[in-house]
């Protein structure tokens, strides 16, 4: 009946439809950090065929079976963010529009991507505002402030709680948790609060937070040498084959180069 119904939120069987102009005004009011460039960059950096091993990993399959937190830990350069692109592709292939993400990023000039408030705004924007549809509670908040006064953190938390309950589930990717500036405990408390309702993937240099270590599933990249070795081999081969020079990758010399690079990568 409604070919674009997935673009709208529902409250008491009523859609709240708004104009393109209003969508623009509400996005400007929220001023949520846009992490779409981070997601696209991770996908662009991913070498074809790499990271596929995670899809058959025992912990990953357990995590897909029911809501909870999957914590992917690895040192800098170990491929966490690129691996998240594999997870993104796997989940985006599912028949759902309930998939959201946030990339903590200390390189962001505004600083918003590395704060708890920025995290909340990012999710409110994605979950509550889509094309020409808006969550009714978010719309009420916008009208209450007449698009001028900014919502407080408590109000953002309340809006997200309402949306998640209405959605009855969804998938959330949180990348580079270690780059959350000083407010990581607040983010972790929020994630734990909704870990029975959402399927959450977190990537971080740090070990799993003590607040969720009893319930979280874990994949530690340092414990996956065979898988990461294969990914490194594919990455190196791709770089050699795409080089500007006319290399013959079958030559013994280049096989030695690949072995040297692979062995020197130390999982990176």
Image (cartoon, rainbow, N blue to C red):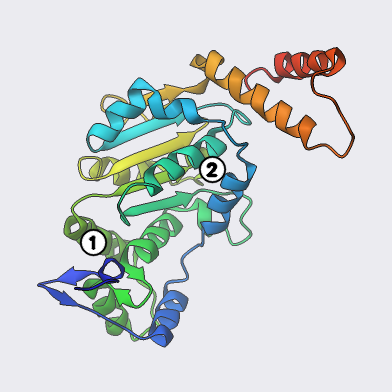
Front-lying residue, 167 or 147:
167
- Residue 193, quarter of the rendered image: top left
Front-lying residue, 194 or 42:
42
- Quadrant of the image for the N terminus? bottom left
Q: Residues within 10 Å of mark 2 (few under 14, many from 20)?
A: some
- What separation in Å lies between label 2 and label 1 (alpha carbons)? 26 Å
Q: Residue furthest left?
A: 12
Is the residue 170 above or below the residue 36 in the image? above
Say whether disc 2 or disc 1 marks the residue closer to the N-terminus: 1
Is the residue 241 above or below the residue 22 in the image? above
Residue under the image location 87 percent in, 40 percent down: 244
Front-lying residue, 259 or 130:
259
Is the residue 221 above or below the residue 14 in the image? above
In the image: residue 191, left or right of residue 21: left
Q: Which residue is mark 1?
A: 163
Q: Residues within 10 Å of mark 1 (few under 14, many from 20)?
A: many
Q: For the residue labelled by badge 2, is the local secondary structure a helix, a strand or a loop?
A: helix
Q: Residue furthest right?
A: 245
- Residue 132, quarter of the rendered image: bottom left
Picture disc at residue 26: none
Q: Which residue is mark 2?
A: 179
Residue under the image location 53 percent in, 43 percent down: 179
Q: Residue 257: percent from the left, percent from the top?
A: 82, 18
Q: For the residue labelled by badge 1, is the local secondary structure a helix, a strand or a loop?
A: helix
Residue under the image location 40 percent in, 78 percent down: 26
């Amino acid at each position: 009946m409604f070919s674009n119904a997935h673009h709208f939120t529902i409250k008491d069987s009523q859609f709240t439809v708004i104009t393109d102009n209003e969508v623009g005004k509400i996005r400007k009011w929220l001023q949520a950090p846009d992490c779409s460039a981070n997601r696209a960059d991770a996908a662009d950096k991913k070498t074809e065929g790499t990271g596929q091993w995670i899809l058959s990993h025992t912990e990953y399959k357990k995590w897909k079976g029911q809501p909870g937190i999957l914590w992917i830990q690895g040192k800098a350069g170990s491929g966490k963010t690129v691996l998240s692109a594999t997870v993104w592709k796997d989940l985006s292939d599912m028949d759902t529009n309930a998939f959201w993400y946030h990339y903590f990023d200390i390189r962001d000039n505004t600083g918003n991507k590395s704060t708890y408030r920025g995290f909340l705004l990012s999710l409110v924007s994605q979950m509550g505002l889509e094309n020409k549809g808006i969550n009714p509670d978010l719309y009420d908040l916008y009208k209450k402030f007449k698009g001028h006064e900014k919502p407080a953190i408590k109000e953002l938390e309340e809006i997200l709680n309402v949306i998640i309950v209405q959605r009855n589930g969804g998938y959330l990717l949180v990348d580079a948790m270690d780059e959350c500036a000083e407010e990581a405990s607040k983010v972790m408390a929020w994630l734990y609060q909704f870990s029975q309702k959402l399927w959450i993937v977190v990537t971080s240099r740090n070990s799993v937070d003590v607040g969720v270590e009893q319930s979280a599933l874990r994949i530690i990249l340092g414990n996956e040498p065979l898988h990461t070795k294969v990914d490194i081999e594919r990455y190196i081969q791709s770089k050699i084959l795409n080089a500007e020079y006319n290399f013959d990758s079958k030559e013994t010399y280049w096989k030695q180069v690949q072995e040297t690079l692979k062995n020197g990568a130390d999982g990176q």
